[in-house]
Amino acid sequence: MRLHEFLFGTALMSIALVTTIAAAPSLLCDNCRPDFAGDVRSVVGARTSEPLAPPLISRDKVLGSAYYDTVSILRSNNPCSDFFGGPPSIGIFNALVSKIRKDTLSGDVGMRMSGATMHIHDERTKKNYRLFEKVSLNSRGPFYRRKAGLWEATVPRIGTFQPNTREARVLLLLHELGHLVKGSDGQWLLPDDGNDDGLSRANSQKIEDVCNEQLHSLGRLAP
């Protein structure tokens, strides 16, 4: 797959410079399957910290609820928000969510990020991150459903949380965000894990450990 066109809404960002460089295959995400790799593009001068909700969340109540739960964590003063770089990470999260499209995949897949990657530097916040050409949210996976009967296939947990729960959905979204954000050491907050189920589970556990209090508090809130 090649990245022919990558459009950002002007409410999210304005692109000052785009340069194309070669890329190696990119494999990542929680309960994901590797797909394609392509060109990497570097964008300098993008503004992405405005906390504007992507339109998709108004059309999907389940995703919308998970979106606002996640934003409420990222905008607050807590260890989970600090791990992702504080409130400026909401802009990156918005860029991720704006790429999401629902798809029908194998039931053990939560989300799948694939295709060409765009590397972005936000001059205002000094944040470095990447976005993938395609972000598929599985309508048959643990974000939306759990096993309802003995005759149905098992739907995997997200971390230690049961599928189709507020905690599981937010953990899944935070896991994907961790693959996109660079830390102060220049490394991705979570290493690529698309070909390694064990590493994927370890990555989810890392987010769950850091965000433990915030994730568990979701289960105590009214639906």
Image (cartoon, helix red, strand yellow):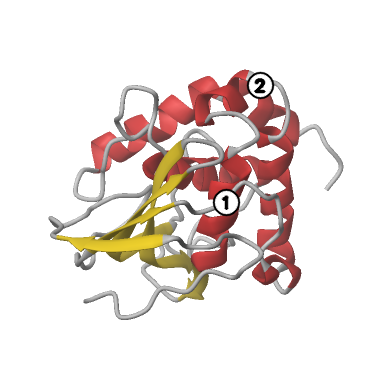
Q: Which quarter of the rendering shows the N terminus?
A: bottom left
Residue 146 is at least partly visible in this image: no
Numbered label attached to residue 25: none
Q: Find disc 1 in the rendering and name its residue.
A: 48
Residue drawn at the location 26% of the way across and 35% of the way down:
199
**In the shown orientation, is residue 57 left or right of residue 195?**
right
The residue furthest front is 16
- Residue 147: image location, x then y, percent: 53, 58
For the residues marked 1 and 2, what is the alpha-carbon distance in whole angstroms?
Answer: 27 Å
Left or right of 135 on screen, residue 94: right
Residue type at numbered disc 1: Thr
Residue at 35% in and 49% down:
29
Kind of residue indicated by mark 2: Glu
Q: Which element carries disc 1, helix, strand or loop?
A: loop
Dot label at residue 213 = 2
Of marks 1 and 2, which one's residue comes earlier in the chain? 1
Say which of marks 1 and 2 sits in front. Answer: 1
**Which image quadrant for residue 86?**
top right
